[in-house]
Image (cartoon, rainbow, N blue to C red):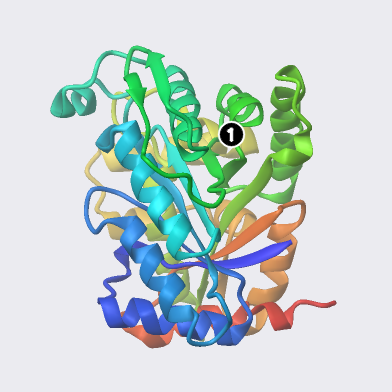
Amino acid sequence: MEIGVGLDRGLGLNWEQYRELARHAARLGYESVWTNAGIDREPMHICAQWSVASADVVPGGLGTGISVIPVGYWTAPALASCAATVGEISGGKFVLGIGSGAIHNPAFRTSLGLPDIGPIGAMREYLTTVRALLAGETVTFQGKLVTLNGVSIGFKPPRVPVALGALGPQMLRLAGAASDGAALNWCDSQRVAEYREIVAEGARSAGRDPSEVAIIEYIRICVDDDVDAARRAYVKSLMGYAMARPGVSKELGYRGHFARMGFDEQLTELEERRDRGAPDDELVENFPVDLALQVGYFGPASGAAAAFRRLAEGLDTAIVRVVAARPGLDSITAVMEACQPSRRPA
């Protein structure tokens, strides 16, 4: 199992802090550094910085990865070109994760001038074209979202695996059929085992060996001697995923995922509080702790490594996603050090 560390773009880091934390990750024995992505700082540039900086500590630098880029903001050739460049800079140690983001939302599609297409169709088109471009092919493709006529990126980089952000059964099967990895989120070990089998079904249906598809996941960890401070920071990072937005189906996305884990009733009560005007602090205080600890960890640093090992069971790449209990680098490095790979039993 590869152990990586995930540095959220919301941590408020400057460029020198990004570079120094990559060096620190290398000194602690992590094998890769990962970021999420949006429409703010360009995530592949962050990964390139990490690769170069960590090479000060380990020959060739650490692996880097993005989990995941919402494809609505990118054309397929631009995505492939940038990923190929980081693949070259890192010496073939970069993983591109892509996901559907908010493409299911009509308002999001309208804001970017995107056609009416569902998440599965969108990701199938991106996986087909981006992976072909990264393989050095000249691509002609006619789709609803992606249309290319004899397009290439002009060079063939080292292999750049393309992972798919996946949670529901259809997306997990697509990951197995057409990607190099399934990037999971907010799972316990039972869900990892179940989702691995769904990915394998998708691979077998496409005539692929399931072992070709890596299972990757962020595992969020927040440490502090003040357990309440750790809990509040951690729950704030989870709450936006777990609660359905008003008017949105509770069967879809993360809300459906947590309902299948048995938390529908508790989340419904929390959503009703919110809809009656409860402030965020009240919602945090009433968030189900059993849900929070089933999919991550908050608390003293002494308990973090064991919780991470338990949650990492069954993964090919397990990523310590840092949740900072307090502003500043100390809370970030405390998580990195609490879960450093050397703390794992051989």
- Between 315 and 156, the one nearer to me in the picture: 156
- Nearer to me, 180 or 84: 84
Residue type marked 1: Ser
Residue lying furthest front: 154
Q: Residue at x 32, y 62 (%)?
A: 45
Residue 42 location in percent, x, y?
Answer: 27, 56
Q: Is residue 287 above or below residue 147?
A: below
Give the total number of marks visible in the rendering. Answer: 1
For residue 180, which quarter of the picture? top right
- Residue 275 or residue 68, whichever sits in front: 68
Question: Is the residue 139 above or below the residue 261 in the image?
Answer: above
On the rendered image, what quadrant is the N terminus found in? bottom right
- Toward which corner of the image does residue 280 lie, by quadrant? bottom left
Residue 276 in view: yes
Relative to 225, say whether 279 is above or below: above
Q: Residue at 35% of width from left, 53% of height from top?
A: 283
- Residue 65 on image: x %, y %: 49, 57
Residue at image position (57%, 39%) is 263
Of 38 and 276, nearer the camera is: 38
Give the left or right position of residue 319, taking residue 141 as reference. Answer: right
Label 1, on which residue? 179
Q: Is residue 236 left or right of residue 251?
A: left
The percent coordinates of residue 101 (x first, y second) are: 36, 36
Q: Position of residue 196 (x, y in %)?
A: 73, 38
- Locate residue 198: give its quadrant: top right
Q: Secondary structure at mark 1?
A: loop
Q: Residue at x 48, y 86 (%)?
A: 56
**Residue 286 shows up from this direction:** no
Considering only vertical position in the picture, is 245 above or below 105? below
Q: Quadrant of the C terminus?
A: bottom right
Determine whether, in the image, residue 319 is placed left or right of residue 254. Answer: right
Q: Of all residues shown, which one is farthest toward the right? A: 346
